[in-house]
Image: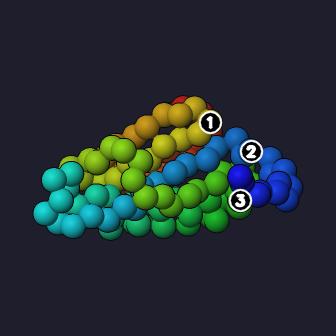
Amino acid sequence: MWHIERVRHVPTPPLHLFVCANRRSPNDPLGPGCGDAGEAVYAAMKDEVARRGAYRTIWIAKTHCLGICPKRGCTVVRYPSGDVFAEVEVADAAMLLRMEKP
C-alpha cells in the first residue's frame, strides 16, 4: 500500500520542457545517450528562461532517457503539447522556448 500525501497543488506552467541528459556506455547498442549535448541544451534553456525572467511560465527539467536516442544532439519533449524533438542543439534552445508551437 502506498502512503503518499499531496502537500500542495502546483499550477501547471504554460510550457514545460524535458531535456534528456542520459549517459550510457560508449559501446552500448543504443549509443552513448544525450549526455553532454543534453547538459548543454539544458544550460542554454535555463539561461534563456533566467534572461527573460520567465520562471513561472516556462519550466525546464533535465531527465534521463526519453526513449529516443539521436545520433547527435539531444531529445527534448514539450508539454502540454507532447511534441518530441530529436537532434536538438544549443542553437535550437530559443526556438523551443517560444510559447507557440515551432
Please report the residue visible at 43 percent of the width from the left and 58 percent of the height from the top. Answer: 64
Real-space Cα separation, disc 3 to disc 1, in angstroms: 17 Å
Disc 2 or 3, which lies upstream in sequence?
Answer: 2
Please report the residue visible at 36 percent of the width from the left and 44 percent of the height from the top. Answer: 67
Q: Are marks 1 and 2 in contact (CB under 8 Å)?
A: yes
Q: Position of residue 18 (x, y in %)?
A: 52, 51
Q: Which residue is mark 2?
A: 12
Disc 3 or 1, which lies upstream in sequence?
Answer: 3
Q: Position of residue 35 (x, y in %)?
A: 33, 65
Disc number for residue 55: 3
* Residue 91 in view here: no
- What kind of residue is marked 1? Pro
Real-space Cα separation, disc 2 to disc 3, in angstroms: 12 Å
Q: What is the count of numbered marks?
A: 3
Disc 1 or 2, which lies upstream in sequence?
Answer: 2
Please report the residue visible at 56 percent of the width from the left and 58 percent of the height from the top. Answer: 61
Q: Are marks 2 and 3 in contact (CB under 8 Å)?
A: no
* Residue 36 in view here: yes
- What kind of residue is marked 2? Thr
- What kind of residue is marked 3? Tyr
**Mark 3 crowdedness (10 Å alpha carbons): few <14, some 14-19, many ≥20:** few
Disc number for residue 22: none
Mark 3 or 1: in front is: 1
Q: Secondary structure at mark 1?
A: loop
Q: Secondary structure at mark 3?
A: loop
Q: Which residue is mark 1?
A: 80
